[in-house]
Image (spheres, rainbow, N blue to C red):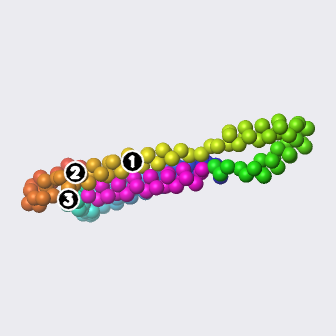
Amino acid sequence: MKPEVALLLVCLAIMAVVMMVLYLRYRNLQLLHQERMAALEKGVAVPVARALAPWSPRVYLLRGLLWSSTGLAIMICLLGLAVASAHRPESAESRMWRAKTLTENLGISMDQAQQIVDKDQNIDDRRVPLSIALLGLIPLGVGIAYLIFYYSDESRKNPQSESASAPSRAGLGLT
């Protein structure tokens, strides 16, 4: 399988998973809304929404670890693809066999066939560059930024000020 096809399949699989997660989240919110509307129509008490966990600065630690590990995984995966796609040079015996086949099938001289085979050998050197693995530095950098923020944040060091400065989620319609 060509590397371009494999990369396309991986991208399509990732998009399918993301779209499925988004659809399931939408469907869950839609069912919750229908349940609330049915309760209002019947005059029954409206079911209480799930309460969100209280905000904590540890969210930044979690985000940092997730982004960093994702960046490392992307770097390792792309580096593995680049190394695996390296084109092994064709053996001299195989090149000579191809040149002999060309001379028999096309009726050309052995020197011309050898030149064609050598050109094909040079053109066929398509592979994924090793530098593609540097794309993993983007999420890795985001993760490191989150980790730096977590370890330099003052609210983590003063837990009593956390409850006073915690953002309210009541205005978001989530409670």
Above or below, comparing residue 104 to residue 14 in the picture? above
- Please state which amino acid type lies under the numbered disc 3: Ser
Magenta-drawn stretch contains 68: yes
**The residue stretch that appears in magenta:** 61-86
Q: CA distance from mark 1 to mark 2?
A: 18 Å
Tally of numbered discs: 3
Q: Residues within 10 Å of mark 3 (few under 14, many from 20)?
A: some
Which secondary structure class fits the magenta region best?
A: helix
Which residue corresponds to mark 1?
A: 137
Q: Which mark is residue 157?
A: none
Q: Secondary structure at mark 2?
A: helix
Horizontal side of residue 2 vs 47, given as left or right:
right
Q: Which mark is residue 56?
A: 3
Residue 156's spot in the image, x, y percent? 15, 58
- Please state which amino acid type lies under the numbered disc 2: Phe
Instruction: Answer with mark 1 or mark 2, whichever residue precedes in sequence.
Output: 1
Choose between 124 and 93: the one closer to the eye: 93
Q: Which mark is residue 149?
A: 2
Q: CA distance from mark 3 to mark 1?
A: 27 Å
Residue 120's spot in the image, x, y percent? 73, 40
Q: Residues within 10 Å of mark 2 (few under 14, many from 20)?
A: some
Q: What residue do we see at 30% from left, 55% from top?
A: 64
Instruction: Answer with mark 2 or mark 3, whichever residue precedes in sequence.
Output: 3
Horizontal side of residue 160 vs 46, given as left or right:
left
Q: What residue do we see at 20% from left, 49% from top?
A: 171
Q: Quadrant of residue 122?
A: top right
- Please state which amino acid type lies under the numbered disc 1: Leu
Q: Residues within 10 Å of mark 1 (few under 14, many from 20)?
A: some
Q: Secondary structure at mark 1?
A: helix
Q: What residue do we see at 82% from left, 49% from top?
A: 97
Residue 37 makes an appearance in the image: no
Q: Nearer the viewer, mark 1 or mark 2?
A: 1
